[in-house]
Amino acid sequence: MLKNYFTIALRNIRKHKFFAAINILGMTIGITACLFITLYIINEFSYDRFHTNADRIYQVGLHGKIGGQDVRVTNTCPPMAAALVADIPEVESATRLNSWGKPTLRNGDIAFDEDKVFAADSNFFQFFSFKLISGNSTTALKDPNTVVLSEKIAKKYFGNESPLEKQLIIGNDKKTYKVTGVAADCPTNSHFIFNALVSAASDDDLKQNVWLNNGMFTYFMVKQNTSVTAVENKFENLVVKYIGPEIEKFMGTSLKQFREAGGTYGYYTTKITDIHLKSTSQGDLEPGGNMMYIYFFGGIGIFIIVIACINFMNLSTAQSAGRAKEVGLRKTLGSLRGQMIGQFLAESMLYSLLSILLAVLLCYLLLPMFNMLSGKELAIGDLFNPRFVGGIVSLLFFVGLAAGSYPAFYLTSFSAVEVLKGKIRAGFKSKGIRSTLVVFQFFISIFLIIFTSIVYDQIQFMQEQKMGIDKKNVMVLHNMRRLGTNKEAFRNALAQQKGVLKISFTNNTFPGVNNTTIVRSGRSEQDHIAGVYFADFDHQDVLKFEMRDGRYFSKDFPSDSTAVVINEAAAKEFGFEKAEGEEVLYNNDSVFHRFRVVGIVKDFNFETFKDKVRPLCVFLRKNSNNMLIRYEGNAQAVVENTTKLWKQYSNNEPIEYAFMDEDFDKLFRSEQRMGQIFGVFSGLAIFIASLGLFALAAFTAEQRTKEIGIRKVMGASVASLSLVLSKEFIVLVVIAFIPAASIAWWVSHQWLGGFAFRIDINPMIFIGAGVAAILIAWLTVSYQSLKAATANPVNSLRYE
């Protein structure tokens, strides 16, 4: 029976090669896109699930509110992990990580700055499921001055030799560390990646016992069959026991008074498998994903498959008149309706099978390109992931049944007597369902055109919007302390180089600010949270920010050593109208020091466009660890000259540099990738819809051949005939525009709501999308219309 079904299906494919090719092409493109989206989503949901105890591991976050500013961060204090195990019985174990930034690693003449270097507790490899290739997982991080390297880093510094028990110099203080282990490179679906792990016994910061000093990452594991809620309920006890006394010591107020004044201090948890997609914290170790984008991409995948299925339905029902006699004859000869339904479903399943085989082949060939587009590192092996294979099988049946169900039930509903008498043909003129499906296809296409255009506009806005500082043509040098006593001499030599305009020392590099702390205005004892950093006299000349009131630091005022420059957001929070006569109290070494406000800077974006500008205080320091270089002309020439000078003054220390505009661009790279992916898949959806429309127009023209011939004989022009055949499709596109535009506006508004700085939705985008959709439909249909309209009427009327 099945063999017969597929034999007849193959015969029908050969008989209708053009429509079969359209169906297979549309389905193949749609399934390929859907498979790539499935791969992407499976990868996003797989983060951190490789840990054996992933269902029991949680990250601790800090929730604080001071001076009206609410923060949720991943940073916690050094003693947190030990207190969790000691004070909360439901906690089985805990571990910590402390980022070391980008220290220099050196083995002989091989020296590089490496990121993703952390200090870790000795139980790291028992707690997490990262694989240790060599070394003892229990003792590798136990002793001071020991380090575990990733496989990639071990090979980089030691080649093919075993690095175990060998020495590696780490950091500017050039301490020597013994290599005690080599770990397999971290899976890419981990919420943090490490290149090297230094023992916690080597890190003085992890030895501190101050609860208000938050800079570590703390994880804990609950005991078997224990709810994390039981742990969260006991966080308040930790706050009262440990935080309360320190608030009183350092802030001069009790925990109760702090809370009565509107302050908040507490802890919360995030399951390790939720960190990548569902984190509500700032300061994650790696940029996370976005559940909204998962919904968007999943929706696009469904839309594309639906469009491909609609093409099959439309063409199958459009050809119903041609297959009506087949149905009538089969019924007359005794075929049951169920058997004929099986025949038509087998035909659609065959289309689906052929399309999926081609789609899997395309996935294999196009995977490297998709990795470039999405920023993922998916491997060929991911195509054989059980979940992905299950998705392929599911797609096979879904597409086959979804595309074939309506034609199967529709075609087999015909009465054999009426079909054989020819009475059923008039009923085939009804295009209600086909029209509805075409409307739905273009509804999806117009929605995607509009939303993709708005995403691109927002990205363009973020790239070109004036931030209040000039981020272009600014080179950033890190780790200036490597120059030792040569920093000033290096600066003077660099200032003489062609293209170098201004140079500034600072302890902070944008985007972001590396110190957020408590400050007060000179008017009250109320605490406020502000970003704080230090810079020299030339900082304004390099960044080109503008003053709203007062002035920036100047060498003409020696008293500026006790001065501060604040931004408008800080002035607003402090209640300052002008700089003159105002003071800011800065908490340094647990003591508040007074600083005179000499200027108020116009607000500039020093973080992401998703966040409002928050209070910022700049203090004077003539010599810091980072250098900003304002240049003109060729960037490569400046890099070469700077590198040459660095070698002269640094005693062969590696140089580490970046460009400020590129660093800012990284902040919205996920939005850029989303826009690119949306653009590609939107184009595919429109192409598939147009493909179906093209075939439907060809069939319609074929069905109306005699009508066109009569009209031509009666004097109709080619233009009028083309309009007759085109207008019904154009009307369907216009009908699709209204709901598509409405929903696109709502979705775009929701997405833009995640940005503190965003575009206003331009009505011209909607008009342009509507015109583009009509133009696409007209160009698609016009070829078939013109072909039919210019045909010789004698050929179509010869047998009448």
Image: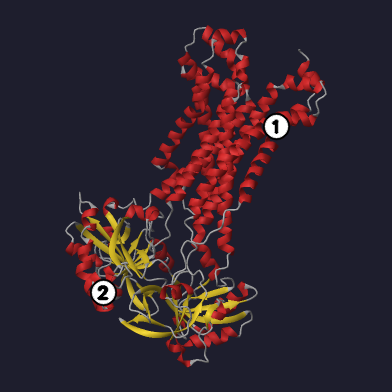
Query: Can the viewer see residue 209 in this picture?
Result: no
Of the numbered discs in the image, which one, if any, rests on residue 726?
1
Quadrant of the image containing the C terminus: top right
Q: Residues within 10 Å of mark 1 (few under 14, many from 20)?
A: many
Q: Using the image as rendered, state which of residue 312 and residue 360 is in the foreground.
A: 312
Q: How crowded is mark 2: few (under 14 residues within 10 Å), some or many (20 or more)?
A: some
Q: Where is residue 613 in the image (x, y as percent from the top left)?
A: 47, 68
* Secondary structure at numbered mark 2: helix
Q: What residue is shown at x 38% (from left), y 53% (from top)?
A: 278
Q: Position of residue 221 (x, y in %)?
A: 24, 57
Q: Position of residue 628 (x, y in %)?
A: 53, 77
Instruction: Count how many numbered circles sit on residues in the image.
Output: 2
Structural distance between the alpha carbons of marks 2 and 1: 75 Å
Query: Can the viewer see residue 426 in this picture?
Result: yes
Q: Where is residue 388 in the image (x, y as percent from the top left)?
A: 42, 41
Q: What residue is shown at x 36% (from left), y 56% (from top)?
A: 275
- The relative height of residue 185 versus residue 604 in the rendered view (above or below) is above
Q: Of the residues shown, which amino acid type is indicated by label 1?
A: Ser
Q: Of the residues shown, which amino acid type is indicated by label 2?
A: Ile
Of the numbered discs in the image, which one, if any, rests on residue 247?
2
Of the numbered discs in the image, which one, if any, rests on residue 184?
none
Query: For this view, does 518 lie left or right of residue 554?
Result: left
Query: For this view, does 275 lie left or right of residue 250?
Result: right
Q: Using the image as rendered, state which of residue 169 and residue 268 is in the foreground.
A: 268
Q: In which quarter of the image is residue 737?
A: top right
Mark 2 vs mark 1: which is more N-terminal? 2
